[in-house]
Amino acid sequence: MGDQYRMLISLGRRHLGEAAIRATLAPAREEAIANIRRGQHQGVFAGHVAAPVLAQALEALMPALAEENAASTWADPMGEAAAAA
């Protein structure tokens, strides 16, 4: 699943442009921001970094996790669980 997602995002960036991909991912990004803010208000997540910044970092991290999982470079079996999350 992650490998397919990574490929779709890569093709989308190439053919549609970065702005179109950002617009397409906006609903997921907003949901991530809301979840992070909730966690910050509840004290689960630190509040010294703004929720939108953390959401953007997670958005950038997900394709890298999917790529590493697809390449099977992780020796730790928990890597698959991290990439699937």
Image (spheres, rainbow, N blue to C red):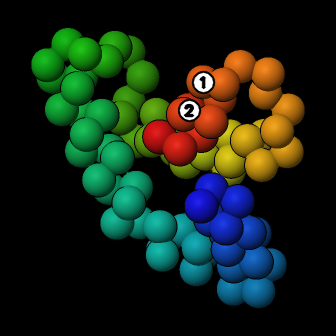
Disc 1 element: helix
The residue furthest bottom is 15
Residue 9, by quadrant, is bottom right
> Between 16 and 83, which is closer to the camera in this rendering?
83
23 vs 62: above or below: below
Residue 14, by quadrant, is bottom right
The structure residue drawn at horizontal position 69% and vertical position 86%, both measured from the top left corner, is: 16
Q: Which residue is mark 2?
A: 82
Percent coordinates x, y for residue 20 in the rendering:
58, 80
Which amino acid type corresponds to the residue marked 2 in the rendered image? Ala
The circle on residue 78 is 1
The structure residue drawn at horizontal position 46% and vertical position 34%, both measured from the top left corner, is: 54
Distance, label 2 to label 1, CA atoms, is: 6 Å
The structure residue drawn at horizontal position 77% and vertical position 49%, both measured from the top left corner, is: 70
Q: How many marks?
A: 2
Percent coordinates x, y for residue 17 in the rendering:
71, 79
The circle on residue 67 is none
20 vs 58: above or below: below
The structure residue drawn at horizontal position 68% and vertical position 40%, both measured from the top left corner, is: 65
Residue 61 appears in view: no
Quadrant in which the N terminus is drawn: bottom right
Decide: few, some or many residues near mark 1? Use Cα within 10 Å; few <14, some 14-19, many ≥20.
Answer: few
Which amino acid type corresponds to the residue marked 1 in the rendered image? Met
Residues at circles 2 and 1 in contact by the CB criterion of under 8 Å: yes
